Each structure stands twice: as structure tokens, then as C-alpha cells.
Image (cartoon, rainbow, N blue to C red):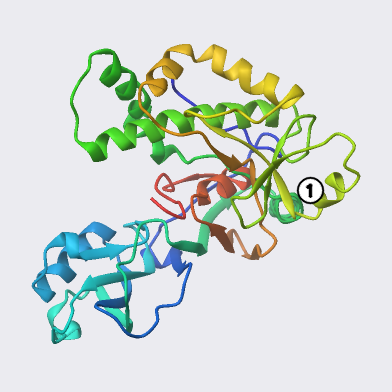
Amino acid sequence: MYDFETPPSLGSINYTGSIRHCPEDFRVTEVISFSPSGSGDHIYLYVKKRECNTDWVAQQLAKVAGLKLVDVGYAGKKDRHAVTRQWFSLHMPNQPEPDWENALPDEINILEKTRHEKKLKSGAIKENQFCIVVREIEGDMADIERRLLCLKDQGMPNYFGQQRFGNNNGNVRKLIEMVKHRRRVKRTQRGIYISAGRSFLFNQILKQRILQKNWNQAIDGDVMMLDGSKAIFVAEADDEQLVPRVNEMDIHPASMLWGRGERLAKADAAIIEAQVLEANSELLDALDQSGSQLSYRALRVNLSLLEWQSENNSLTLNFSLPTGAYATSLLNEVVNTSGFQNAESVD
């Protein structure tokens, strides 16, 4: 019932390819949302990791520094099967630094060190920069490049990636079972289930907007979100600047992440949301008991910095994504690939 496929906005895809032939084929560089001050109780380490996940790196740093894991911070998790660069913080007031380079495993390299007054918190990311190589492409490369030009011009659908929903899309069903049977689960796991349920409803609304071919246009009653910001407003039908601003990527149509609070969408936009909610009443009941607060997410992502190079049957993509956006959403628009189930800007 809660299986979900993401229809591409550019129509069906008949091309195939593969990624992750080696970790260097999938590179991610994290850009946090502030500059460390250079002084304070927290050491900030800019780390390059290869074929290891973020939690494991945090454990290694804590071990070498003689800290508890809770004293290590990071802004977001990054792919394991990749070469990634990201920041970590360690609470070490007036403590001597260990010999990082000689004490850490070979998979971890320290690229930069500084200090800051506060711990690095989850979500403190401005963007993630991707370089992904798609190999063994079977299809019309000229048409693939046409698709990329369209994405650069009109943006990409801001779907939540498949990994948000767990193995076999089980996280949404687990949320319903947790609420229905009053099962006690760990706080972290509870948060994952709630997030999956809200994300599923958002994806369904975006799917309907794509099927109606208005996902990247303002419709009557839409909630609009400023590019690069969480600031929102409700579109007015007589706003003459609305269409130019949407076309210029200054603003994007947005939809709700379900929770407590006033739903802002009106007219046509509200009708689409209501239809999705009515079709998922059981999930809605579970979310209503979760205590989450209503928020909004843009329906599309600005890809104005997207660049690419093609050679023979391979394609190299360079692009940036804001926090919470998924590289899979771009790949889903271009070619059917294998090996990208965990490709995202932030876990």
C-alpha cells in the first residue's frame, strides 16, 4: 500500500547506466552554513573519508580523542560507498590534541583544523556539492543532455529519496503499527518513522503535481517558498510578478509536511493536498498522534549550477544541492541507474 515510485517530470526514461564502480565515482563535499570562529571549546575537523560511514568516523574520532560519542558533532551523514568531505566537532576545552594523522585509520584524513564556541549541530548545512560519474550508459546521449538542459532551466522535483522509507518501504508501515499497537520504540527510531510518514505524503502530493504538469508552476492558492530560504507566503491570483519570479527560480511552489498547525494552501493547491490526505487516512491518523508540527518544503530544487561532461558512454555530473535534497531525484530524471539507493545530500 505504501510502495512509491517517483515519476520523472520529463517523461519516461529508456536509458540505463550504472554508478559506484569505485568510491571516486561518487564524491560529496559538504559546505556548512557558518564559518567557525577559530577559537572556542570545540575543535572542528574537516575530514575526508573513503568507503566508511559518518557514524563510524565519529566513533574513531571519539576514540582517538578519549571522548564520549555524545561529545562529537556533525551536520549530516554522508554516503558510505563514496569519497566525501565533511566537518566534525569535538568538545575539547583546554585539552591537548592527539596526533590525528598517525592515530586514525587510513580511510580518514584530516584536511583542516580550527575551533568554534559551539558544537556542530545536525542540519547546519548550506549545501552539498556532488560529482557523480555514470558509466556504461546505453541510450541517446544527445537526448540525455537535452534532459540535463531542461533540469538546469526548470529545476528538478524535490522528492524525498527512497532511503527515507527504509528497506522495502517499511518505515511508513512501522509508524502505523507503532501507533496502532502502542509499541514503545527508541526515540531515534520513532523520529525516523514519523519522518517517513510525512515524507510519503509530500511525495504523493508532488507526484500529483507532476502528473498535472504544474509542479514547477504557481497554481491558484499555492504556498510559495523563497529560493535558498524557508520563508513562505501564499500566492495571490492578481500578483503580476508571480510567474516571472517562478520562471527565474526566485521562488518555488511548496507543499506541506504534515503536522499540527494551520494549512496555508487555498483553492486548487488545497484540493490536491486534500485528495492525497483523503487517500491516506490511516497514515494521517498515525501522524496526528505523533505530535509533529506542520512545515513546508519546496516542490522543486534550483539546479542552475548543474554542469556535465560526456565521453563515449559515460557522463560526469557536477551539481550542488541544498540540505534535504536528494541526488537520486536528479538521476531519476536522466537515466535508470543501479547503485544509487543511498545517494543524497543529507542522510
Question: In which image quadrant can residue 14 be found?
Answer: top right
Residue 121 located left or right of residue 265: left
**Residue at 62% over, 15% down:** 275
For this rendering, which residue is in front, 12 or 326? 326
Q: Position of residue 236 (x, y in %)?
A: 82, 36
- In front: 219, or 60? 219
Specify few, some or many for label 1: CA neighbours under 10 Å numbering under 14, 14-19, or 20 or more: many
SS at badge 1 = helix
Q: Is residue 83 above or below residue 242?
A: below
Please say whether residue 151 is visible from this viewpoint: yes
Q: Is residue 300 above or below residue 267?
A: below
The residue indicated by pointer 1 is: 246
The answer to whether residue 182 is left or right of residue 320 is: left
Residue depicted at 56% across the width and 12% down the height: 278
Viewer-nearest residue: 208 or 133? 208
Residue pictured at 18% horizontal, 79% vertical: 93
Residue 195 at x, y percent in the picture: 40, 35
Q: Horizontal placement of 182 versus 19: left or right?
A: left
Q: Is residue 128 above or below residue 215?
A: below
When the figure is inspected, residue 99 is found, relative to residue 333, above or below; the finding is below
Q: Can you say which quadrant of the picture contains the N terminus?
A: top left
